[in-house]
Image (spheres, rainbow, N blue to C red):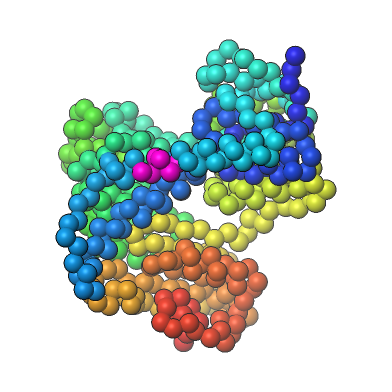
């Protein structure tokens, strides 16, 4: 006999978990199907373990600077194997915690790989594409299976790692090649360099972090170079040769780079393989599932949230989309997610965070005479005694006519923590005068946002 549910959620990642728990709280009978670990990309193989690696990679740098503060460590020895093992242990704890949260919310967790039989029935198998072991009937279905890293089409690509693999390594090699210019590539380049790995980063274009404010991206590039990352622009891999642990990357410029590992951080794509969306009549647009403002697909009772929609692929966005869906459908509290103003961060070294329009986007929207920039560039007090380290950049983008702050951007220590609070002001349409009459908290990095002349 089929198991019947008000809602079947496909994928126990950030968006799916949020929707399932909120819908159950509103009284719906909910099942969530997951073939991998509970927690999704962010918890298992993304932002959480990556941020822990960032913290670990910063420790050696702090130890090097400790003597300027009168602290003299007796030994600084980097053990990436211990760090990776500790990170995996924390991921195990979080995985168990999320399973417990589902049980407390009375959401049925079904382990296995889901695919549509038709628009109201889900088949679940132990292996992707395997023989179905369960058949679920769903009044509504929510798709939240996330995305997966993509590999470039080059010879020997199977010898390279994607970001998922990095958290499973026993230890990091002495030399690595990182391929890519996006936030994953820049973050891992900083992590590896901080842990003593010799890093070469290959970038096909002429700059890092496409889509972010170009001036901020240039400051990140400057800081990465200062920390020893060898960024090679207009350079991409043509082939990977050798055997695991002893590789050679052949580039389009004719160079051959020897290394112990290659990270292919060349983009992510919605993970739609195996879902059998055609059987449900769900439309695919390119590589994504298009949805309306209520997260609804072209099939009225099938919804999608998070990275499968390929709009803004960030954990908080997926969570809010999942909760908005559940509140609207099951909680009699209809609402839609505002995707217009979303803060984001790159945990590169130095760190970048931003909310609102970049300089380039503001000029494109308001014209070169319709916007004005305010900047502060300096070395933070934390670096006053070591007398080294990258300088901060704080930047405001204003509309000339109203003095409204269109964008607030920063590169430097604690950038993400600072921009999170600035996002409130930008969202409330604060003006430069609002910033100016806010009393500074001294001495801090963030005070520069309210003292810019």
**Quadrant of residue 157 within the rendered picture:** top left
Q: Inspect the magenta stretch and tell me whether residue 89 lies in it.
A: yes
Answer above or below: position of 117 versus 166. Answer: above
Q: Residue at x 23, y 53 (%)?
A: 230
50 displayed left or right of 336: left
Whether residue 84 is in magenta: the answer is no
Q: Position of residue 328 (x, y in %)?
A: 78, 47
Q: Residue at x 25, y 58 (%)?
A: 60
Against 305, residue 419 (above or below) is: below
| Farthest residue, direction right | 332
> What residue do we see at 60% from left, 47% from top?
318
Q: Quadrant of residue 412?
A: bottom left
Q: Position of residue 317 (x, y in %)?
A: 60, 51
Q: Please tell me which residue lies in front, 386 or 419.
A: 386
In front here: 53 or 378? 53
Image coordinates of residue 257 in percent, x first then y, are 18, 41
State which region is magenta: 86-91
413 relative to 373 in the view: left or right: left
């Amino acid at each position: 006999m089929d198991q019947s549910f008000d809602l079947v959620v496909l994928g126990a990642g950030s968006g799916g978990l949020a929707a399932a728990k909120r819908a159950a709280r509103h009284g719906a009978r909910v099942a969530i199907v997951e073939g991998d670990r509970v927690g999704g990309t962010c918890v298992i193989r993304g932002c959480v373990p990556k941020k822990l690696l960032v913290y670990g990679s910063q420790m050696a740098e702090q130890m090097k600077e400790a003597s300027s503060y009168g602290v003299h460590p007796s030994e600084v020895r980097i053990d990436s194997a211990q760090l990776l093992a500790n990170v995996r242990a924390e991921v195990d704890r979080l995985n168990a915690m999320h399973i417990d949260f589902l049980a407390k919310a009375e959401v049925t967790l079904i382990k296995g790989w889901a695919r549509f039989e038709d628009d109201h029935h889900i088949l679940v198998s132990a292996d992707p594409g395997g023989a179905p072991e369960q058949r679920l009937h769903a009044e509504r279905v929510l798709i939240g299976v996330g995305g997966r890293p993509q590999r470039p089409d080059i010879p020997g690509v199977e010898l390279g790692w994607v970001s998922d693999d990095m958290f499973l390594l026993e230890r990091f090699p002495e030399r690595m090649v990182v391929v890519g210019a996006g936030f994953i590539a820049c973050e891992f380049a900083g992590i590896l360099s901080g842990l003593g790995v010799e890093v070469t980063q290959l970038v096909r274009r002429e700059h890092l972090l496409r889509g972010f404010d170009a001036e901020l991206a240039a400051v990140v590039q400057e800081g990465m170079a200062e920390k020893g990352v060898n960024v090679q622009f207009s350079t991409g891999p043509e082939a990977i040769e050798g055997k695991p642990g002893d590789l050679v990357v052949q580039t389009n410029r004719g160079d051959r780079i020897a290394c112990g590992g290659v990270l292919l951080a060349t983009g992510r794509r919605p993970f739609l393989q195996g879902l059998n969306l055609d059987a449900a009549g769900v439309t695919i647009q390119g590589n994504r599932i298009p949805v309306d403002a209520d997260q609804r697909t072209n099939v009225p009772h099938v919804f999608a949230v998070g990275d499968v929609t390929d709009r803004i692929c960030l954990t908080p966005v997926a969570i809010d989309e999942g909760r908005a869906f559940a509140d609207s459908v099951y909680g009699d509290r209809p609402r839609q997610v505002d995707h217009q103003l979303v803060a984001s961060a790159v945990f590169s070294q130095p760190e970048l965070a931003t909310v609102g329009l970049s300089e380039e986007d503001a000029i494109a929207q308001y014209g070169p005479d319709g916007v004005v920039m305010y900047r502060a560039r300096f070395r933070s007090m934390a670096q006053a005694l070591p007398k080294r380290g990258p300088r901060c950049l704080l930047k405001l983008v204003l509309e000339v006519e109203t003095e409204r702050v269109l964008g607030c951007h920063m590169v430097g220590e604690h950038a993400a923590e600072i921009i999170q609070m600035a996002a409130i002001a930008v969202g409330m349409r604060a003006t430069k005068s609002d910033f100016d009459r806010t009393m500074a908290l001294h001495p801090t990095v963030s005070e520069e946002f309210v003292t810019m002349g």
